[in-house]
Image (cartoon, grey):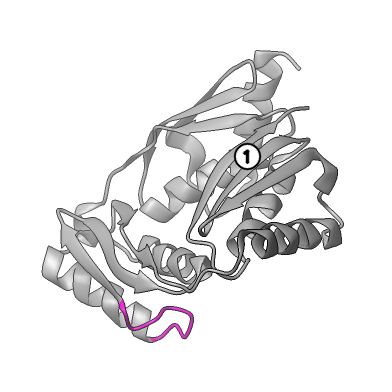
Amino acid sequence: MSNEDLELNVTDELLWDPKLDSAAIAASADDGVVTLRGTVGSFRQKREAKQDAERVHGVEMVNNELQVRILDAHRRDDADLRGAVLQAFTLDSLVPSTIDAKVMDGWVTLTGTANWQFERDEAEFIASNILGVVAVDSEIELVTPGPRAGDVKHSIKKAMERNARLDADGVSVESSNGQVTLKGTVSSWAEHDDAVDAAWAAPGVTRVTDRILVAY
């Protein structure tokens, strides 16, 4: 696929998403690497735009350089924004009470501890949806007992093999002291994400190093 065709397909996908105002988003492509530039009205829209681009066939990587510009009517002071984030956490049963948030100039930093990666992901997702947030950083520490490395590797490979969308033979797993490294090649971002999710779902995993390549 030519760069021009890939740019057109990504642009069409952004336009197709009713959650996005794509008028101020420009997409450029260079050998499978797509760069998004422009402005959006919320941090959630920035995340959505990246996910939309990753869905397009032929996209190997997305550089998300979109800037979040909050309308004056939606601006909130940091204390109010932190309160809104923490209130949203209390309403979500997947976010543990050990997670806290700091806010500076609309930039949210998540702190504290969690036992599972999905809890960190949920906290980041919830914070990113709060009106007025311009960015989210996660400094949440995973605290979980670590099983033997062989158990982790075996359980991750079995989870990959059960996944109908994932060619498990294309991904290798290395594990040591709760740290997992994934290597190999997959044919889509959906496969890539499923492999990473499978690794994070294994008990005792505290870190996943993603070295999987997406090749069409």
Q: Quadrant of residue 107?
A: bottom left
Position of 192 with respect to 71 (left or right) is right
Q: Name the residue at 48% across, 45% down.
A: 21
Task: Say whether residue 96 is magenta.
Answer: yes
194, above or below 203, in the image: above
Q: Amino acid at mark 1?
A: Glu
Categorize mark 1 by other alpha carbons within 10 Å: few (<14), some (14-19), many (20+): many
164, above or below 97, in the image: above
Position of 207 with respect to 9 (left or right) is left
Question: What quarter of the picture does the N terminus occupy?
Answer: top right
Position of 121 with respect to 41 (left or right) is right
Q: Name the residue at 37% across, 52% down.
A: 43
Whether residue 15 appears in this view of the structure is: no
In the rendered image, residue 4, in percent from the top left (x then y), is placed at 66, 15
Which portion, as a residue range, is magenta? 91-98
Residue tagged by mark 1?
A: 54
Q: Quadrant of residue 89?
A: bottom left
112, above or below 137, in the image: below
Task: Say whether residue 106 is magenta.
Answer: no
Residue closer to the observer: 151 or 161: 151
Residue closer to the observer: 209 or 60: 209
Q: Main secondary structure of the magenta part?
A: loop
In the rendered image, residue 179, in percent from the top left (x then y), is placed at 52, 53
Name the element at disc 1.
helix
Whether residue 23 appears in this view of the structure is: yes
In the rendered image, residue 168, in percent from the top left (x then y), is placed at 81, 48
